[in-house]
């Protein structure tokens, strides 16, 4: 089970102090993710999903425990583990091409090579022809594609996706699911994908982890064996999503169940 | 003071255009902005000329646009205007350059260190309320009627606006840009030059523009007291010679320089920001 190249969390916890209030965002958590695995984190808002991604990215530091990737402890952000946000977080003062090349520009890669890699990724996310466009000229889906290209251009081993398609319309989201799945199949990056949509989690993940709210802790770990590619509308996907929902409701019985989880 | 922002064309070109405008039939061409503007300024110049000829004031106090135009041509031919403009520009650029470097540095530090913001920051907000010309008497006491006194006043005029622009620009930058950039490997100085400053640039630009306007105003005020050739000094010389035409000619020149700087320096930067960030009606 444990992969030397994979991700390990051992007793990782995070509390926030605001004024004299202490908020436990993530209870001590153990987790093993194999390299190349697609793991979906499912939970209501405020259950520490984003905190967990932040801790794995290194942008946040745990109050207890250790995060290791490939046997090396995480202590700070690295282009090896790129976080993608719901709002894409592209830089509005740069063109699409310069955005995609941003991570490469921070390295010592020759200029021509930066250019080539950026162009290649722009093509792979189907943004050919938009190299010189600015962010405000792109649609929401195109922005997420550009953000994906920017993340993949530095050739990370891990993508940390924090509800990246949450703000998109259903059609665009479906297309991006397909594209993400095929990019993942081609590159075999480890993916941690946060969502509050059960069917999205089942359609994308090799595994679905269910988190309970306040403090966040993993209350369910489902392996999805359905053949790929999958669609949100597949009967098998819906069936498995319904099973997970049942477990989820039971797990959340002591807390206030969040209706957003029941959304289609 | 407000006149400085009006796009007033120089009298010479307006005089040439006037002949054409009178011949054109007014009803059909009034639709375009440029035509309306031309008609307005032509009428204004005509009214001014009439007022100076038939008004109750003596010629030497109220010269018409033709006399002012002649003064402008004279000033340009003698080289005095060009020389004076260059001297004033050199002073402005020196003082503004110092403010630019200092403002970006101090503004950045104010965001970075809470203690500085609580102490020095409060002082800067206070000093910003002081019109920069008020520094002039003190500057002359300290430095005498020297270049250093002028530079000092120009710096005092522009520094605080730039500091406050940089500070609020950086402080209001969305933290998600910084997160994304750190994640992609940016750190240290590069994080500032590649992300923090460009992200804050729209707000910084507003501070730079205000700083420029204040620097320009304080420079003109300071130069009125100086005897060496400069734009402000040309105004004062006109007064000493009882030559209202020269005073007005220099005023037109000062307006032209101010408008030119705005059009050549700030307007393109603002267009660039609007185009990139999608501000204004040009957004997709």
Image: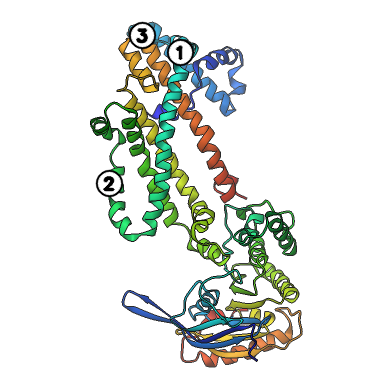
| Chain at tag 3 | B
At 39% from the left and 80% from the top, the residue drawn is: A23
Circle 3: element type: loop
Circle 2: element type: helix
| Chain at tag 2 | B
- Mark toward the start of the polypeptide (3 vs 2): 3
Is mark 1 in CB contact (under 8 Å) with mark 2?
Answer: no
Q: Is residue B269 above or below residue B183?
A: above
Tell which of A235 and A80 is nearer to you.
A80
Is mark 1 in CB contact (under 8 Å) with mark 3?
Answer: no
Disc 1 from disc 3: Cα separation: 26 Å
Within 10 Å of disc 1 (Cα), the crowding (few <14, some 14-19, many 20+) is: some
Are the residues flagged by discs 3 and 2 from a single subunit? yes
Disc 3 designates what residue?
Answer: B55
| Chain at tag 1 | B
Q: Is residue A43 visible?
A: no
Disc 1 designates what residue?
Answer: B75
> Coloring scheme of the render?
rainbow
Disc 3 from disc 2: Cα separation: 46 Å
Give the label, 3 or 2, closer to the camera. Answer: 2
Within 10 Å of disc 3 (Cα), the crowding (few <14, some 14-19, many 20+) is: few
Tell which of B115 and A239 is nearer to you.
B115
Q: Is residue A247 above or below residue B20?
A: below
Label placed on residue B126: 2
Relative placement, left or right, of A11 versus A40 is left
């Amino acid at each position: 089970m444990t992969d030397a190249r994979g991700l390990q969390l051992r007793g990782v916890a995070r509390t926030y102090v605001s004024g004299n209030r202490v908020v436990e965002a993530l209870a001590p958590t153990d987790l093993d993710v194999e390299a190349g695995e697609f793991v979906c984190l499912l939970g209501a808002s405020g259950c520490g999903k984003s905190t967990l991604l932040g801790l794995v990215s290194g942008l946040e530091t745990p109050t207890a425990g250790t995060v290791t990737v490939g046997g090396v402890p995480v202590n700070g952000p690295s282009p090896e583990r790129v976080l993608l946000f719901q709002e894409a977080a592209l830089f509005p003062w740069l063109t699409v091409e310069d955005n995609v090349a941003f991570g490469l520009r921070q390295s010592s890669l020759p200029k021509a090579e930066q250019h080539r890699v950026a162009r290649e990724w722009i093509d792979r996310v189907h943004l050919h022809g938009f190299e010189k466009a600015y962010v405000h000229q792109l649609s929401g889906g195109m922005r997420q594609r550009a953000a994906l290209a920017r993340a993949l251009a530095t050739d990370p081993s891990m993508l940390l996706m924090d509800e990246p398609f949450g703000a998109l319309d259903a059609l665009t989201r479906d297309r991006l699911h397909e594209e993400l799945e095929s990019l993942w199949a081609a590159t075999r990056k480890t993916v941690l994908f946060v969502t509050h949509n059960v069917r999205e989690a089942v359609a994308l993940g090799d595994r679905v982890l269910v988190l309970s709210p306040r403090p966040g802790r993993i209350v369910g770990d489902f392996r999805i064996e359905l053949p790929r590619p999958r669609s949100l509308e597949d009967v098998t996907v819906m069936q498995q999503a319904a099973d997970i929902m049942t477990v989820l409701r039971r797990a959340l019985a002591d807390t206030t169940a969040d209706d957003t989880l029941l959304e289609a | 003071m407000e006149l400085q922002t009006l796009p007033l064309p120089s009298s010479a070109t307006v005089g040439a255009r006037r002949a054409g405008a009178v011949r054109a039939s007014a009803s059909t061409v009034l639709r375009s902005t440029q035509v309306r503007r031309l008609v307005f300024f032509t009428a204004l110049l005509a009214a001014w000329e009439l007022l100076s000829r038939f008004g109750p004031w003596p010629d030497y106090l109220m010269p018409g646009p033709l006399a002012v135009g002649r003064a402008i041509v004279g000033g340009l031919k003698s080289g005095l205007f060009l020389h004076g403009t260059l001297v004033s520009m050199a002073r402005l650029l020196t003082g503004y350059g110092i403010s630019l470097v200092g403002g970006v540095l101090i503004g950045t530090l104010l965001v970075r260190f809470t203690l500085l913001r609580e102490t020095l920051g409060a002082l800067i907000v206070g000093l910003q309320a002081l019109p920069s010309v008020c520094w002039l008497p003190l500057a002359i006491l300290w430095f005498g009627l020297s270049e250093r006194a002028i530079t000092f006043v120009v710096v005092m005029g522009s520094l605080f606006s730039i500091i406050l622009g940089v500070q609020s620009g950086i402080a209001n930058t969305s933290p998600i840009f910084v997160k994304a950039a750190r994640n992609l490997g940016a750190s240290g100085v590069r994080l500032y030059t590649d992300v923090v400053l460009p992200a804050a640039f729209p707000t910084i630009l507003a501070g730079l523009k205000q700083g420029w306007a204040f620097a320009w105003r304080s420079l003109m005020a300071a130069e009125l007291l100086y005897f060496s050739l400069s734009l402000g000094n040309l105004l004062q010389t006109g007064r000493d010679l009882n030559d209202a035409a020269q005073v007005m000619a220099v005023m037109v020149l000062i307006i032209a320089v101010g408008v030119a700087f705005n059009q050549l320096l700030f307007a393109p930067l603002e267009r660039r920001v609007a185009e990139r960030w999608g501000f204004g009606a040009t957004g997709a």
